[in-house]
Image (cartoon, grey):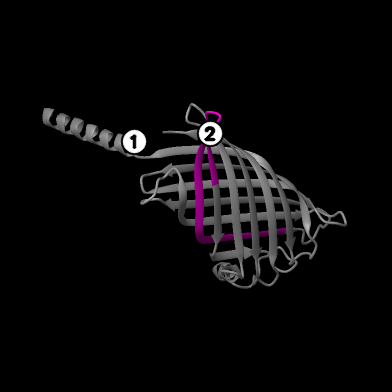
Amino acid sequence: MLKTYHSFTLFFFCWLFLVNNSFAQSFGDVWLSTGIQSMASKDEGFSLLNYKGNKSTSSVGFALRKKNKTQWIQGDFSYGVLANQPGGTMNEMGASFSTYTFYHKLKPASKGFQYGWSNKNTMHIRRHNQFSNYSFRYDYFTSLGPVARHLLPFEWKKKSFLWQNMANWQLLGFQVKSGYIGAEPENYQADNSLADNFFNTVSPFIPLRDLDMNFSSTLFWELPTGNRLGLRYQTNYTKLSGIKSVYRLDHSIDLILNVRLW
């Protein structure tokens, strides 16, 4: 019994040492942001008119920085009312979940250029307020692509700052969106099986024919506690092709609170 107790104690302290050592070699951050987004959108499956307006936007994220790479996950949500030139309006909601991986084995983790890859999953839902029929529209895509960022730490008036610029280009994946006029997806056939209907509605996300490009620039103020306050500008352009194309261009300004967990 005593031998078992000593073995368990040794195992526990070894496990504790490994966990502490792993944490000592990594940094974990979580952040929250809120801001305003200006969007222009056109869904040719419904109308050739542009819809424009302002939306509220928010995001939550987590970053784990290790010796050789940084892993970053982020969820975004936006909602607002867009209007066309004649005065028609639609409610627009967007939600996305993105992951980023940056590699810095041969470079400092806290400054300079870093490259990697990203995965983005985005859903947009629209409700046109002037129509009772065919008023519901949506689109979804998931894709992979390269990502790059540049980190520039600097000091000004004895305060520490970090300027981060990041860009990603989604290249390859698949999409599902509403068909021409109707809310059903493109290529939907009601008399097919559920599985056949699903696969018929999936279209490839092909480089250059389909686009999703994002650029952001963030200025962080390093607080004495190790946390950060940030101001971020972000712009995103999306084009989803098919029977009828969907276009989106947005610009946003966000305030960010970044909290160091360990």
Q: Element at badge 2?
A: strand
- Residue 173 shows in the view: yes
| Magenta region includes residue 142 | yes
Residue at the (77%, 58%) spot, across then down:
135
Foreground residue among 213 and 62: 213
- Residue located farthest toward the front when viewing the structure as drawn: 157
* Residue designated by label 2: 228
* Residue designated by label 1: 24
Foreground residue among 39 and 3: 39
Tell me which amino acid carries mark 2.
Arg
Helix, strand or loop for the magenta stretch, by majority: strand
Q: Looking at the picture, how far across and down is residue 231, in whole percent?
A: 61, 39
Gap in angstroms between the C-alphas marked 1 and 2: 20 Å
Residue at the (72%, 46%) spot, across then down:
55
- Is residue 65 toward the left or the right of residue 7 in the image? right
Q: Quadrant of the N terminus?
A: top left
Q: Is residue 185 above or below residue 218?
A: below
